[in-house]
Amino acid sequence: MKTQIKEHTDLKVLTIDEAYDAMVDYLDKYYDRTNSADIGDCVSDLLLWADGKSFDAAVQEDWKESVDKILKQNSAQSKQVNNSQEQAKILTLHEAYNAMIGYLEGFCERTNSNEIRTLLDDMHLLINGISTNPAAFIEWKESVDKILKQNPRIRPYLQLTK
């Protein structure tokens, strides 16, 4: 049975960095449940250095492209806010979720990963706002809530130990 999940969830908005961090949290929890090597590789690629940059500049470029594609598709719904004297892109909950799907589709295409494909099959939202797997979207909302409640926010930095 499909569950309606659209209700008022689009009232939440995230910056691009918050959406990125929610994606890392979501995938990290998925990795903890599955121990998927490909998901682990994906999460590792997404971790940041202390300066906020990823290990591989292509990762952040791929994320930006996924976000831009979603915002372009939803240009009537995209919003701009003034954030520290610069314009910051804002994503709704669904836009951020779809940007994550777009990022993972690119990762899957590059790596030809069946594990990522399985994850994606469970994540897609239908046009009417119904999830192919409501549990996946609920977990996404939990990751978003976790990130939005952080004060101060903790970015997914690589922590080296000796």
Image (tube, rainbow, N blue to C red):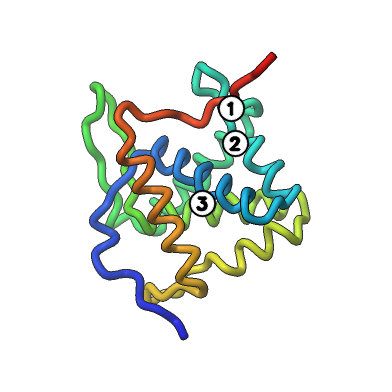
Label 2 CA crowd tier, 10 Å (few <14, some 14–19, many 20+): many
Along the viewing direction, whichever of 66 and 50 lies nearer the viewer: 50
Disc on the earlier residue, 1 or 3: 1
Q: Amino acid at mark 2?
A: Leu
Disc on the earlier residue, 2 or 3: 2
Q: Quadrant of residue 8?
A: bottom left
Q: Quadrant of residue 73?
A: bottom left
Q: Amino acid at mark 3?
A: Met
Q: Quadrant of residue 109?
A: bottom right
Query: Are discs 2 and 1 less than 8 Å apart at CB?
Result: yes
Q: Amino acid at mark 1?
A: Ser
Residue 126 on image: x %, y %? 45, 74
Residue 39 on image: x %, y %? 68, 49
Name which residue lies at 51% across and 49% down. Answer: 26
Along the viewing direction, whichever of 123 and 148 lies nearer the viewer: 148
Label 1 CA crowd tier, 10 Å (few <14, some 14–19, many 20+): many
Residue 63 on image: x %, y %? 53, 41
- Residue 46: which disc? 2
- Residue 54: which disc? 1
Q: CA distance from mark 1 to mark 3?
A: 16 Å
Position of the C terminus by quadrant: top right
Name which residue lies at 56% across and 27% down. Answer: 48
- Residue 100: which disc? 3
